Image (tube, grey):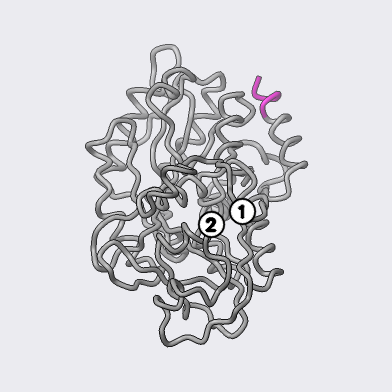
Amino acid sequence: MRHFIRSAAVAIAMATASTFTLSAAMAADLSGAGSTFIYPVFAKWADTYKKDTGVGLNYQSIGSGGGIKQVIAKTVTFGATDKPMSDADLEKNGLVQFPMVMGGIVPIVNLTGVKPGELILDGSTIAQIYLGAITTWDDAAIKALNPTLTLPSTAIAVVHRSDGSGTTFNFTNYLVKLSPDWKDKIGSDTAVEWPVGVGAKGSEGVANTVKQTDGGIGYVEYAYAKQNNLSYSKMLNAAGKVVEPSLESFGSAASNADFKGAKNFNVIITNEPGDATWPIAASTWVLIHKTPDDAAATGEALKFFAWAYNDGKETAKALDYVSIPDSVVDLIKASWKADIQTEGKPVYVGQ
């Protein structure tokens, strides 16, 4: 069975563009798929973990929807999603979920004459742009947010994800909270019926399309925007304050995340209060089987996650991700021992 899982994961990875593979001999010792939001920190963690332990990691950055499908199909040991699964779906598929990191999603733009970080947007204006009601960059609503900028009359080119994406879920979840029109007409999910714009696959596709299109606007996780020097906007938050994306503004949003009081660690942190809070904050959850077919592979994966919680904090911080608090990590590890078992014994035996 382990040989089959390993072979299947390698075959899928070879066909996937956004995949990192470490350790040729043990490429699928750890195998996962899903969230693009967590990809930058997973890649860094994997590199360090390989050096520290000799254990390789294969993670396919294919979007939350793809990760959910693959973990349910058992072609990977774990999935990663930025939209938590419902209690019913977890039970139906024999899965558990737990948060790995928190961070932010940023609007990215390609606007001639406007420097990175100069533009200010808010949720209601973004919703009107993505509804097709605001079509040029010199629209009165955008001017009102940017009175000191000279905005061009360039047509706005809307770009969105074409694949099932937790980044899309959190982006649209935020728009639902700020725009009654968006709530009534579009709603929030990993994939929605976009009224306007062009779709692109993954963060890479969205970023490349925006970069190649004068007047383009899209959305990606901040770590990806930062690593790839993408131009992003500031935001007006729930407190009416203009904020920049940063570890501090993501941390302000994360401070409202009550994972302790939430069943299955299900907490959404968009449009949270606070003067310093970034409004489009998000979490990534790992999905893994309660009763795994390959207990050894699952045990190795849990060791990696424990290492990431304990020894990966500085790496996460450097990429502007917010680490899960130690008190919540203790609850997560306790849930592993209680819920992830084989033959009545916990798969994870660490501290």
Q: Is residue 312 shown above or below 243?
A: above
The residue lying toward the viewer, choosing from 325 and 122, is 122
Pointer 1 residue: 196
* Image position of 335 with respect to 20: above or below: above
Rendered-image quadrant of the C terminus:
top left
Q: Is there any visible trace of residue 313 in the rendered image?
A: yes
Residue pictured at 69% horizontal, 34% vertical: 9
User: Is label 1 in contact with label 2 (beta carbons under 8 Å)?
Assistant: yes
Q: Earlier in the sequence, mark 1 or mark 2?
A: 2
In-image side of 273 versus 337 (left or right): left
- Magenta region includes residue 266: no
Residue wearing tag 2: 130
User: Mark 1, residues whose alpha carbon is within 10 Å: few (<14), some, or many (≥20)?
Assistant: some
Residue 30 seen in this snapshot? no
Q: Residue at x 47, y 64 (%)?
A: 319
The residue range painted magenta reads 1-5
Residue 102 percent coordinates (x, y): 39, 52
**Amino acid type of the residue that numbered disc 2 sits on in the rendered structure:** Tyr
User: Residue 232: x, y in percent?
Assistant: 51, 71
Residue at the spot 62% in from the left edge and 58% down from the top edge: 159
Q: Which of the 4 image quadrants contains residue 79? A: top right
In magenta segment, residue 2: yes
